[in-house]
Amino acid sequence: MKIGLFIPCYVDAIFPEVGVATYKLLTSLGLDVEYPLDQTCCGQPQANAGFERMAETQALSFDEKFAPFDYVVAPSASCAAFVKINHPRLLKDHRHECMASEKVMDVVEFLHDVVKPTSLPSRFPHVVSIHNSCHGVRELGLSSPSERNMQSFSKIKDLLSLVDGITVKEPERADECCGFGGMFSIEEQAVSVQMGTDKLERHIATGAEFITGPDSSCLMHMQGIAKRLGKPIQFIHVVQILAAGL
């Protein structure tokens, strides 16, 4: 199978090491991975801000770039969810068959559901607390939402269990929002910061050395709060842990 690697804006501009780790991990598993150099934003920031006409153009470009691949894999639950759920609606007036949206997956989802590794050559001898981002939980099903009466599961936890030396924790109210929410953190700054502070404290209470998760944006939000408050905890994308040592 041929995989198109989609690297979202936050990763490309601020956390390029997450994109590198994703490529290294996927290729180490023997997968055929291609990174289209002319890819652009998926349109999520524009759509979230109410500028859907702008997002339509980017959705169309995204689909043209990634439609030929068997899978489109991204190290971002938020962006993967936006493409999967919103691109078909954005492109319906273009009479354009939205192919890429049917193939897009977050890297955790792809590894857990498609690749299904039974072992990984990674080692991370640290205590980590899992941050379950909202899009990952409620739109991609990376873990079970607490508001539903269903059997508990976590695809992130399943994959991290394959990493040598790691100790995995989860905070109280494990799937509560960190307050980032894209435009929400700008339009409702005080509420966003308080939500992030509360979430950060719950992660720290687990005794973790690192907070990890599938979205660099959520991790960035909490990292900024931790830095301002002088909190002694580090942040790392889950794919960096899965690729540790490669």
Image (cartoon, grey):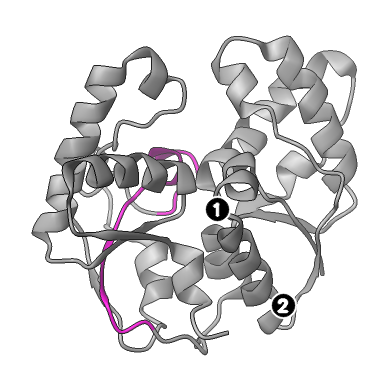
Q: Position of residue 117 (x, y in %)?
A: 55, 81
Name the residue that disc number 2 marks: 27
| View extreme (left): residue | 205
Instruction: Specify the quadrant of the image occupied by residue 205.
Output: bottom left
The crowding category of the residue bearing disc 2, from other C-alpha atoms within 10 Å (few below 14, some 14 to 19, many at least 20), is few
Instruction: Specify the quadrant of the image occupied by residue 99.
Output: top right
Instruction: Pick the residue in front: 156 or 206.
Output: 206
Quadrant where the N terminus sits is bottom right
Q: Position of residue 52 (x, y in %)?
A: 68, 13
Name the residue that disc number 1 marks: 15
Q: Is residue 172 visible?
A: no
* Image position of 87 with respect to 234: above or below: above
Q: Was residue 127 drawn as part of the magenta stretch in this picture?
A: yes
Q: Earlier in the sequence, mark 2 or mark 1?
A: 1
- Calculate the distance from the C-alpha at mark 2 to the C-alpha at mark 1: 20 Å
The range drawn in magenta is: 124-142
